[in-house]
Amino acid sequence: MEYLPWALAAVFGLLAAVLLVKIRLLQKGADEIAEDFAQRLATDTNTVIGLSTRDRHMRKLAASINVQLRLLRQQRRRYLMGDRELKEAVTNISHDLRTPLTAICGYLDLLAREDKSETVAQYLSQIENRTEAMKQLTEELFRYSVILSTENLDLEPVNVGGVLEESVAGFYAALTERGIEPVIQMPEGHVVRSLNKAALARIFSNLLSNALKYSDGDLEITLLETGEITFSNHASRLDEIQVGRLFDRFFSVESAQNATGLGLSIAKTLAEQMHGTITAHYAAGTLTVRLRFPET
């Protein structure tokens, strides 16, 4: 009986050692699953998660994750295929529409030179206006297809403030016509980033067009030394749900006329191609679009 405590201690020690080994194996298996899972998500590969441990519970977990990974891979491929088909459709449609629209505009120009009654002239004027609107929408669609097909932009040092001033100057007449007097705040020194000047100007142009559509009569633009640019204005016609979808392709608020819903989507695509980010926030009736170009 005097050996019983020692025997129990030895048994408990052995059990503790076995449990410790078991825990270590489970930890190792969990680490392997986590590492492999992150790699499988980052790459498009058919390789499944593998384990060095023989523990049946960890292997069951890995097998279950592998099933979900296969489903996720199938969905990703369907999405990429659908996205590619959509881009091709946009390109083809924009090309197909441009040709007949050009012919229509030509015939309208010829009709405008002919003698006609006042009523016919009014009808013709309406047709010309709607045709011009359709032409603008088609051009926007075409430019969007070109941007999607361009994977890499040529980047060079660009004075962000200079491009911003040029863009605002180009929209100044349209802004003041709407009663919008833009307030611009910029640092004294130049803010230079590695960007594509034409793409940056296009982003600013689309953001200013957005302000023309939705501003209640104000616009504040701020450029910081960090490379952050904000466009802020009161927009009572918008709400948080609409603002959350502003960057979605083909989304257009009902109050926006002659809109494809591509302007801010184009801005987002161009910003990301230049390693920047663009976000929109709505609070207290104010829309704030924030554009960031960090130093690289």
Image (cartoon, grey):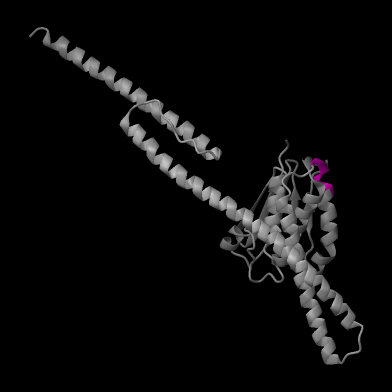
The x, y position of residue 75, in whole percent, is: 51, 50
The x, y position of residue 183, in whole percent, is: 78, 57
Instruction: Give the residue drawn at x 69%, y 65%.
Output: 260
Number of dots carrying numbers: 0
Q: Residue furthest left?
A: 1
Relative to 37, residue 8 above or below: above
Instruction: Give the residue drawn at x 73%, y 53%.
Output: 147
Instruction: Give the residue drawn at x 72%, y 57%.
Output: 145
Q: Is residue 244 left or right of residue 153?
A: left
Tell me the quarter of the picture where residue 88 sits. bottom right
Q: Nearer the viewer, residue 190 or 43?
A: 43
Residue 58 visible in the displayed image: yes
Quadrant for the C terminus, please.
Answer: top right
The x, y position of residue 264, in whole percent, is: 69, 57
Tell me the quarter of the picture where residue 129 sits. bottom right
Residue 179 visible in the displayed image: no
Q: Nearer the viewer, residue 271 or 160?
A: 271
Instruction: Give the residue drawn at x 78%, y 59%.
Output: 182
Quadrant for the N terminus, please.
Answer: top left
Q: Nearer the viewer, residue 208 or 57?
A: 57
Magenta stretch holds residue 204: no
Magenta stretch holds residue 160: yes
Looking at the rendering, the stretch of residues picked out in magenta corresponds to: 155-162
Relative to 104, residue 55 above or below: above
The x, y position of residue 39, in whole percent, is: 52, 34
